[in-house]
Image (tube, grey):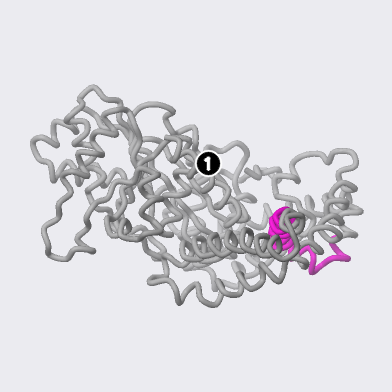
Amino acid sequence: MAPYRLLRGLLRISVRVFFRRIEVVGLEHVPRTGAVVFFGNHPNSLLDPALICCFCERVVRFVAKDVLFRSPLLRPVLRAMGAVPVQRRADHGEAPLANELAFERLFAVLGASGAIGIFPEGLSHDASQLARFKTGAARIALGTRERHPGLALRLVPCGLTYMTPQRFRSSVLVQFGPALEIAPPSAAAFRADPRGAARELTERMEASLRALTVNAEDWETLRVLDGVRRLYQPPRISLDERVELARRFATHYPSLRHEPEIERLYGHVADYLDRLGSVGLTDRDLGRELRPGEGLLRLLRHLVLVLVWLPAALAGAPVHLPVGLLLGITGERLSPRKDVIGTTKFVAGFLLLALAYLGLPALLGLRFGWRAAAVALVLLPLSGYGTLRVLERVVALRRLAKTSLRLLFLRREVEALRKERAALVDDVVETVQRFKPEGLELLFPRPSPLASAE
């Protein structure tokens, strides 16, 4: 387990650098002990299993296509993570597939109350909707129950929503849904009709995962629709209700987006979110009272960004700028498919920065001595962190003077934003009432102006 835990620790650091924001919800649905099958959607190649491994709080052995083990770079990583190679028809054509040993290894992991991970869509893809599930995950689960009738086995759906999958420093939402269980009749049905029982369980799995996936054409649309959802929902709704509400907005927006009233509301919500972001506030912050001196503290943080992290980022630009430009220009060209662009940038960026962070101090050490090497070892990561901080607040930096004034008079700005929010809540509710599809039952009655910002 030591290699697994060490590699998982490195992956956690790496993904938190690659993504600006990672939100993990639903951990209460993940059993701390017992056999678990994690199954997720597969929009972003190797980043998908990395995120589940990093944040599910279990040791997970993922099913991986056997062709990945041919890579001299990936093979030791996959083995350290305990990945189980399987053959796929897409990789081997009409040749007979030999997966009996792989299935037996997965049965053994689950039989020992371990956890495995699998992507029932099979191939990763960049489509906006789930692909049809294959039955392999269901057959593994049902086969395990057949071998271990008394085993407590749960299947946990993992919804992965990337705001802009191909971009560095974007955001990702990792959602763990309520676990599915296999009732004894299902195991008996599997013995009588393996194909039919596997398909029935696969349909249950697909439905549970579909409830966790929210799709939109780009991050900006998803960001604004999420803002609309926060303005609309009442206080203290459940996670399932929150996801269902987000899914409804994302589902029906494309057919209504060209309505003048929808375009107007969309623009107002986008401007409101921009104003919040420029002073480092969230929609949730408007529901609480400001702490004494909070405006001054936020102004000081903004000045630290301008006076400390911006110069640090500029100092390290000769290292980080070429890497960023190289990945931006070649990321798509180096990727065989659109769905692996994010993974390609992640792996290439990690390797290039590791080479720079180790190689440059070594060169300086040879030329100027160990003190210069030690200084470079400290300053390069600090400069990289400064670059990340600047990228996160680039909008605020563009509006430097206005942002500083708003932070200086934060209490006045918050009051103005609260009034704007109250007006937007009424506008959103009225628009939903007017444009909701005929026959669609509303999830909630009209919310109060203090709607939850969860």
Residue at x 44% of width, y 40% of height: 3
Residue 361 vs residue 205: left or right? right
Residue 273 visible to an observer of this rendering:
no
Residue 68 sits in quarter: bottom left
Residue 407 vs residue 57: left or right? right
| Nearest to the observer: residue 293 or residue 22 | 22
For the C terminus, which image quadrant? top right
Q: Secondary structure at mark 1?
A: strand
Residue at x 77% of width, y 59% of height: 278
Residue 322 percent across, percent down from the top left: 63, 73
Q: Is residue 387 magenta?
A: yes
Residue 409 percent across, percent down from the top left: 91, 53
| Nearest to the observer: residue 432 or residue 18 | 18
Residue 179 vs residue 315: left or right? left
Region rendered in magenta = 376-403
What residue does disc 1 label?
25
| Nearest to the observer: residue 284 or residue 437 | 284
Residue 352 vs residue 98: left or right? right
For the N terminus, which image quadrant? top left
Q: Is residue 231 magenta?
A: no
Residue occupying the far left of the picture: 192
